[in-house]
Amino acid sequence: MLDSLKRIFLLILLIILTGILSVCMPGPTDLEKDNPHDENGSNFIPPEITHLNIDDGEKIPDRNLTIIWTGNAMTTGYAYRIDSRSWQLTIDTSVTLSDLDEGSHTFFIEPHNNYFTGERVQRNFEIDSIQSPGIYFSPRQITGDSIVSVYFDNISNFMGAHIEITADESTADLGGLTIDSEFRNIFRVFHDSTNKHRLIIDMAYLGGSEGVSGSYLVGSFTVNPLSSGDIFVDTAKTIFRDTDNNSIALTGFDRVRIYQ
């Protein structure tokens, strides 16, 4: 009989304690509201990029670029991408991008933690490392059969040019030039690729005696890589002429790097 009374007493005591705790302890809804990881709560804080060291539209005078960022306290890692390359995961807060092509690029970065991915941030920027006036290529790095474009960068008052693009015999075979349609309307262009390691381009302005200035896509040529090495402008044999038939001094020359 005594044991039965003890069990009844303990049961009553348990019921009373349970009632007290249910009144004193916050309910699940209150806990959720205080949880910064709960996207439905009033205190939710998503992972966020709070600082990026490049501005949208910035012009970068170097092929190598270190991008530095900062995430908020809720961020534990990042995913980043340059242009259309694959996404990369990191817990670091910087990345160095090497040997970027001349021209426009876009950098994307997303902050994340174990629960959420934050808002993606992107920056459009331009690599402008070739000193004007000059010649540059795109792409600047290749690993297999490729098409490489040739550009003039900010050349003033020129009437004609002789250009020789070359590769060591052990590096690559070069195909003929496919001339850009807009450039074809401005210049008469002749090209010779009978020497498969050297592309020779001659051009003359069609517009009269006043010359032409600006930046242009000249055209593109094919590359069949044979080994690692460089394709480059032979500066000793490349000559630009102005309206008085004087030589125009170019200060920027690019090259294509082949990785095999």
Image (cartoon, helix red, strand yellow):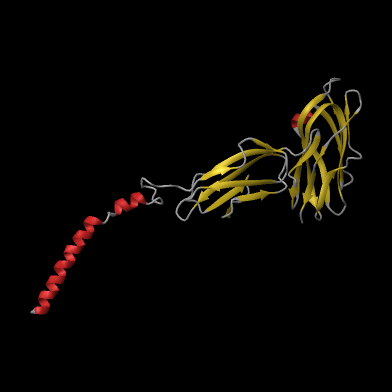
In the image, taking residue 26 as reference, residue 209 lies left or right, namely right
Percent x, y for residue 12?
14, 67
Image check: 96 left or right of 183?
left
Asked if residue 234 shows in the view, the reply is: yes
Picture quarter with the C terminus: bottom right
**Which residue occupies the foreground of this view, 37 or 250?**
37
Against 218, is 12 above or below?
Answer: below
Q: Quadrant of residue 15?
A: bottom left
Name which residue lies at 49% across and 47% down: 118
| Spot occupied by residue 111 in the image (x, y as percentages of width and height) | 52, 49
Out of 212 and 194, give the one closest to the viewer.
212
**Which residue is depicted at the point 88% across and 42% down?**
234
Q: Quadrant of the N terminus?
A: bottom left
Q: Is residue 147 above or below residue 26?
A: above
In this view, the residue in front, 103 or 171, is 103
Q: Position of residue 190 (x, y in %)?
A: 86, 34
Answer whether residue 185 is visible to the viewer in this image. no
Toward which corner of the image does residue 237 lie, by quadrant?
A: top right
**Extreme residue toward the top, this view:** 209
